[in-house]
Image (cartoon, grey):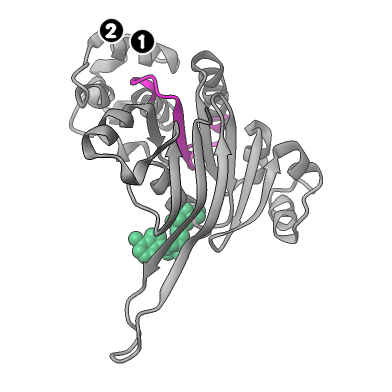
Amino acid sequence: MTLLSVENVTRRYRLPRQALLTPPAVLTAVDQASFTLERGETLGIVGESGSGKSTLARMVMAFERPDEGRVLFEGKDLATLAPADLRALRPHFQLVFQDPYSSLNPRRTVGWSIAEPLRATGQADKARVAQALEQVGLRPEDADKYPHEFSGGQRQRVAIARAIVTRPSLLVADEAVSALDMSVQAQILNLLMDLQDELGLAILFISHDLSVVGSICDSILVMEHGKTVEYGAAQQIMRAPEQGYTRSLLTAAGLI
Ligand SMILES: Nc1ncnc2c1ncn2[C@@H]1O[C@H](COP(=O)(O)OP(=O)(O)OP(=O)(O)O)[C@@H](O)[C@H]1O
Ligand SMILES: [Mg+2]
């Protein structure tokens, strides 16, 4: 069964009223997006700032509901699940943000933060935390340190450890390497690819950088102002983009 299937998903935001008697304007942040992601595969979502990438990610994570369309995880429509069923499903899809501090509590040890998704399911256990740290190239002893004691790249490894500790089948990485130096970026991308092989993870990889997306993804969805510009095999899109917008992203990334 397809792991993740997004069907004609639309999300609108009401903007503040410009004047007293005018109706509020509505922004369509995501407009009829559709894609599928199979187990162990990587789909890149690429587009300029404001194109709707994070909005799409929030709907995949069931943090927001689509106004139209459906998000199916293992065939289950996230919007119609009972709260208890959604809670039970949550450990299977995890998110990594650009800023690791958004998932790590600065006043707690990283071991505490990594164990957090496990506590939610009543399975917190030191051995699982130690294993997750080793899987991301850190040491079990690092569990006792605080987030500020790590470098930016190491902190992102901690955030990834927190995301994989529940052994998810889907990882949503929203600009997960964008804030890092080029060499550290490459290390984190390699780590994600290794984890993918090791754990059979599917990755939804969101980035404004088409060169990064093209290097690691099986397929690519290009977004502009909420609309899907292009969707297909990564090799095809990188080699022969059909749309001018995609070509402009390739040019911006210095790829053509
Ligand atoms: N809660 C909200 N209320 C109103 N408008 C919103 C809200 N969230 C996002 N938007 C708008 O929706 C559009 C898409 O935003 P989104 O954050 O999904 O873009 P993005 O592609 O992730 O951009 P970036 O690359 O900068 O992260 C933007 O115009 C944004 O201003
Ligand atoms: Mg975003």
Q: Nearer the viewer, residue 219 or 206?
A: 219
Neighbourhood count class around disc 1 (C-alpha, 10 Å): few under 14, some 14–19, many 20 upward: some
Furthest residue in direction bottom, as rendered: 21
Report the amino acid beneath label 2: Ala
From the top left corner, tell me how far across and down residue 150 is, in percent: 35, 26
Q: Residue at x 63, y 34 (%)?
A: 217
The answer to whether the residue labelled 2 contacts the one labelled 1, judged by CB atoms less than 8 Å apart, is yes
Ligand 1: which quarter? bottom left
Q: What label sits on residue 131 in the rendered view?
A: 1
Instruction: Tell me where residue 216 appears, x and y as whole percent.
Output: 64, 31
Q: Quadrant of residue 94?
A: top left
Q: Which mark is residue 127?
A: 2
Mark 2–mark 1 distance (CA, rounded to whole Å): 6 Å
Q: Amino acid at mark 1?
A: Gln
Residue range (magenta): 164-185
* Horizontal arrangement in the rendering, residue 204 relative to residue 110 (left or right): right
